[in-house]
Structure formats: C-alpha cells, structure tokens
Amino acid sequence: MKLRNILTLGLLLSGTVLMAQTVLDYDKSPNAEDNNTYIEHHNKEARPIPYPHLREADVMWTRRYWRKIVAKEKMNLPLYYPIQPTRDRASLATVLFQAVVDEGTITAYSDDEFSRVLTPREVGRTLMKVDTNTFPDLDDPTIMITTIDTINVEPGQIVEFLLKEDVFFDKQRSVMEFRILGICPVIEKEIPETGEIIKEKLFWVWYPEARNVLANAEAFNRFNSGERRTFEQIFQMRMFSSYIVQEENVFDREIRDYKKFSPMEQLLEAERIENEIRYFEHDLWEY
C-alpha cells in the first residue's frame, strides 16, 4: 500500500513538472513579439514572498505612519516612468489604473480606513473629469455657448503617492519591520473659479492585495536591464525616497496641521520622527 502511494505521488509530481515545462518553454527562441534576445520568465511568473506569520503576542512595539512619495524625485523615477506604457514596462500609476478599472484584480477604497469599496465604474468616473465652458458667440455676443469637454486623468499627472504603513518590532524574530498597508495616487487639480492648484487623492488600495499584481510589473533598473526589479520588490526593499507626513496621534492630525510656518519646519519634524524610529531600534541592542 505504501509503495502504491509513493508511485502515485511520483506520477503526480511528474505530471506537474511536465505541465510546468509546457507552460514555461525555456528552449523557445524569441521573435519580434518578444522584442528581446531571450524569453523572459522570471518576473512575469513571479509571486510575492509571503509575510512571516505575526502573532499579536510577539509585537513588542508598533506605530503607524503615513508617508509621501514625490513621483519626480530622482530615486522615484522608476515608479513614474514610462508615462506611456511600452511593451515590457508601465508606470506604477498605469499598473494601478489598469488593475482597478480594466481588470478588477485590485479593489479600490474611498479612504485610508478602507471603509467603503469603490466600484471600477466609480473609479473610472474619478479618472474622467467633465469640464464645462461657457463663452459668448462671436456673431452675436448676447448668445452664450456652452461646451462640455471630457478630460481624462493620465498616469503622467500623478505627482505623488501616499503610503500608509505600520512599523513594529517582532520579538520572536528580533527584527524591526516596515509593513505597507495602503497606497494612494495623488494628482494636482486646478480650481477653475480661483485658479488655485490643489492635490486630490484618487483612491486607496489595500497593499497586501495589490502585491500579486505589483510582483509581475517591472520597473527600470539603470544599472542592469537583465536584473529589473518589480514594484513589489522596490517597496519591500525600501528602494524609494519618501518622508513622513503623519504619525498616529490622539488629535489625528498631520504634521502640517501643527507645523504651519514653513515647509522646512515640516521636513525637520518628519526627520525627527524618522530618527525616533532609528534610535528606538538602536537602543534595543547592546554592543
């Protein structure tokens, strides 16, 4: 009986290997559609590494922070470009738009509490602005003509990304860890009546759900195109530039709400909070 079970298991494993070889044909020669000297499999078939199991009893210390990623900063350019998708790459905003609106593989939420789900149609309406213009007729100035223009929000208009994350110390593994909870793309928007430029949050996505999509989306590596990283790897390895805009507090206020005099004060406050995290981790150990 044991021998029969072993043979059955062997046949199943053999079938699995043959199926994998059929799907991933490593001997296939590239053609014009591949646009490469070899067939790429790694990132297209990648899956995110599961998070280590975390028990409440093992979390010795934790704090929640909100960060801002300025898309056009030099270190963040792999997240911002290409503005128009190419055959093998797309910007982070494009990947999120397609996954939320076109494919429905990522759920969008209205706020960072993830309290209300936005349907793909609702998000699509957010990405499509309707602008109404009224002006006098050239032949008869007493007649007013109204035109309606449809303006689509393009990925290149995304100027910032907001991150919501928890920082905690796991005493079971003795590590300080950053774990992202949500991502929100932000655009700049002009108010027609006043001409004022404001920033608008489009939607929030639950990052653990988005990992499967981001793990298959490549970002440019200016040092080696044969070792491109995915967006999921960039976030997990913290290969981006950002600064803290809010630390959880009893007033539920952002840094700009109590450091109002200058942007420099806000950046210095963000740096102070960053140093608190570093010092806390450093003080846990004896040297």
Image (cartoon, helix red, strand yellow):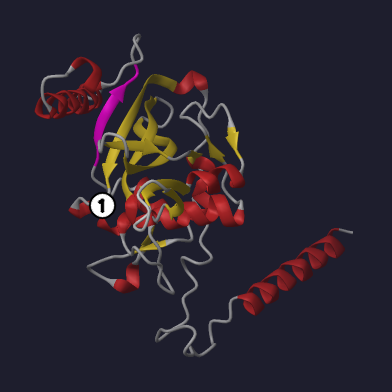
Taking depth in this image into account, of 180 and 15 the one nearest to the observer is 180
Residue 214 visible? The answer is: no
Question: What residue range appears in magenta?
Answer: 242-248
Among all residues in the image, which is located at the extreme right?
A: 1
Residue at image point 61% right, 42% down: 119
Q: Is residue 247 located in the magenta-colored stretch of the structure?
A: yes
Decide: is 76 above or below 207: below
Left/right placement of residue 252 relative to residue 17 reads: left
Whole-percent x, y for residue 31 in the image: 49, 90
Was residue 280 drawn as part of the magenta stretch in this picture? no
Whole-percent x, y for residue 151 in the image: 43, 53
- The rendered magenta stretch, by its main secondary structure, is classed as strand
Q: Nearer the viewer, residue 210 or 132?
A: 132
Residue 287 in the image, given as x and y percentages of width and height: 16, 27
Quarter of the figure that contains the N terminus = bottom right
User: As shown in the figure, which amino acid type bears the numbered disc 1?
Assistant: Asn
User: Mark 1 highlights which residue?
Assistant: 76
On screen, 119 above or below 48? above
Give me the residue at 46% from left, 22% from top: 58
> Residue at the spot x=52%, y=57% of the render?
98
Query: Circle 1 sits in a helix, a strand or a loop, which is it?
Result: helix
Residue extending farthest to the top is 250
The quarter of the picture where residue 162 lies is: top left
